[in-house]
Image: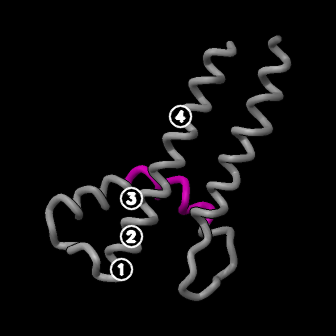
Amino acid sequence: MIELLGFISYLITLYTYVIIASVILSWLMAFGVVNPYNRFVSSLAHAFHAVTEPVLRPIRNSLPDLGGIDISPIVLLLGLFFIQSVVLPNIAKVFL
């Protein structure tokens, strides 16, 4: 069971990196640093959007409207860090 919790922690870390990469790519596209019409960039953005949007959409719907600022990735990252640092170790203590 401890190995399964370690694997879940690894997946949370990997998903954290995907969220950060998605945010950075969206900033680069918004400020015109990368060309959004490039095939590789658009396919990468689409892949990031497909992976992160199902989790970010309910968070965006529950947050108040802050204008042009989207803090849903920050809320998701805080939730993932909480699960990784508080919930998983406490579950691991039960099985030790």
For marks 3 and 2, give the CA distance.
10 Å
Which of disc 4 and disc 1 is earlier in sequence? 4
**Residues drawn in magenta:** 50-59
Q: Quadrant of residue 88?
A: top right
Please provide percent x and percent y for residue 81. Answer: 69, 47
What separation in Å lies between label 1 and label 3 (alpha carbons)?
15 Å
Q: Which residue is mark 1?
A: 30
Mark 1 residue type: Ala
The overriding secondary structure of the stretch rendered in magenta is helix
- Residue plotted at (59% across, 29% down): 8
Q: Nearer the viewer, residue 50 or 95?
A: 95
In percent of width and height, residue 28 lies at 35, 73
Residue at the spot 48% in from the left edge and 49% down from the top edge = 17
Residue 58 on image: x %, y %: 60, 61
Q: How many neighbours does mark 2 have within 10 angstroms: few (below 14), some (14-19), or many (20 or more)? A: some
Is 54 magenta? The answer is: yes
The residue pinned by badge 3 equals: 49
- Report the Cα–Cα distance between label 3 and label 4: 18 Å
Residue 31 lies, in percent from the top left, at 35, 82
Nearer to us: label 1 or label 3: 1
* For residue 50, above or below residue 29: above
Q: Residue at x 20, y 74 (%)?
A: 35
